[in-house]
Amino acid sequence: MSDTPRDTYARNDLTTPTRDKERAAWDRDAVHAVLDAGYLCHLGFVRDGAPVVLPTLYARVGERLYIHGSTGSRPLRGARDEQGLAVCVTVTHLDGLVLAKSAFNHSVNYRSVVAHGTAHQVTDPEELRIALDAIVEQVAPGRAADCRPGNAKELAATAVIRLELDQVSAKSRTGDVVDDEADLDLPYWAGVVPVAPVYGTPQASPHSDLPLPGYLAGPTC
Amino acid sequence: MSDTPRDTYARNDLTTPTRDKERAAWDRDAVHAVLDAGYLCHLGFVRDGAPVVLPTLYARVGERLYIHGSTGSRPLRGARDEQGLAVCVTVTHLDGLVLAKSAFNHSVNYRSVVAHGTAHQVTDPEELRIALDAIVEQVAPGRAADCRPGNAKELAATAVIRLELDQVSAKSRTGDVVDDEADLDLPYWAGVVPVAPVYGTPQASPHSDLPLPGYLAGPTC
């Protein structure tokens, strides 16, 4: 029997930030919301005792993360073995620059998730297809059904690793500047500059004279 | 005498991606350009044998990266010791979604830098001040001179680690979809959806009735 309620992840040393603990959250909905708002993650693993951090794409399917890897990558080949590969997957959304009256109180608004665990390479062809579709969908919802699916050769050339969401937490900062009382009257502008990814006009390739699909017509984020 | 020309970083196993090697670059200007275009990095290190990846802020000063840490962080305290802390610092800019006719040829346009090495905590007060100013400047150029500088107590409460740029490379994908010849006539839209961070209207805090500073008036990126 676990002490962890079903609607939250475990709160422990691994999943608790060492700084600004009050910004952390363990409830599944909060974690899922951060993950579902993105598709770019930073994947960390250990190679020859040293850390490696690479940007890549991911998708969340229930309580699993599927992370796009490379069949040529030596360390990721470790994920093929039964013992798997220790990873840390981090997703970060930057929401604003927080400019305080003092240099010290400068900050950023953000939402992030850090997931720790042991990843395994997806070897089952059906699961691999589901994972790849999910990654395409995470980037552009509606797209997986509107392109040619991977064939056997392509699937064999694609590596996806699976991480169960278990040792995971979210962290965020929102809202206004927090200045020291003594600094409030200093003659410096203070406030928040919002920032968000914005999608531009889709640029059709020369081999595409079709109308823009509906799922690309609206804002993608 | 080094085999590495002064205008490029070393090209070796550590700095060569295992995938899409043709997208990699080692020249200093290319690496600096990617670093200078951002301020958010993902810092990787090893804790109890497992990888940890955390988002944080950085600045480039010449051939050094200064990375904002936490004085409370147990692993980062390792950077205080003479042997330092093995880190990987990764900076990624997402530039576009690349939607191909086949699921397999989907991709993203991006620019990234991966820097490996041993980081050391900045302990010299003068260097710490330079580093913190640089981090503020990297986020909002012009800001460091327009806020209250850190005092001794604040500097003591701030941890910054230094990484010499040495084992580093850039990687990028640009341009249009690359579809298989056999897929070109498939009835799917294909093309690139550009994406970039966009800054919104700065929101002054209630304690700031000053006009918006010039360095925040234009586009920040």
Image: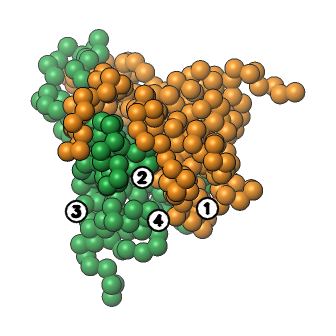
Chain colours: A orange, B green
A117 or B66, nearer to the observer? A117
Residue B212, placed above or below residue A41: above
| Kind of residue indicated by mark 2 | Thr
Q: Are marks 2 and 4 on the same chain?
A: yes
Viewer-side label of 1, 3: 1
Viewer-side label of 2, 4: 4
Q: Are marks 4 and 1 on the same chain?
A: no
Task: Point out residue B11 in the picture as x, y percentages from the top left corner.
Answer: 37, 74
Quadrant, the C terminus of chain A:
top left
| Kind of residue indicated by mark 3 | Asp
Label 1 is found on which chain of the structure?
A: A
Which label was assigned to residue A77?
1
- Give the CA separation, mark 2 to mark 4: 16 Å
Residue B55 visible? The answer is no
| Kind of residue indicated by mark 1 | Arg
Q: Quadrant of residue A6?
A: top right
Question: Which type of secondary structure does the marked residue at label 4 adopt?
Answer: loop
| Kind of residue indicated by mark 4 | Thr
Q: Residue at left 32%, top 23%?
A: A214
Task: Point out residue B174 in the picture as x, y percentages from the top left corner.
Answer: 26, 51
Residue that label 2 marks: B90
Q: Quadrant of residue B205?
A: top left
Question: Which type of secondary structure does the marked residue at label 1 adopt?
Answer: helix
Q: Residue at left 77%, top 25%?
A: A4
Residue A65 visible? The answer is yes
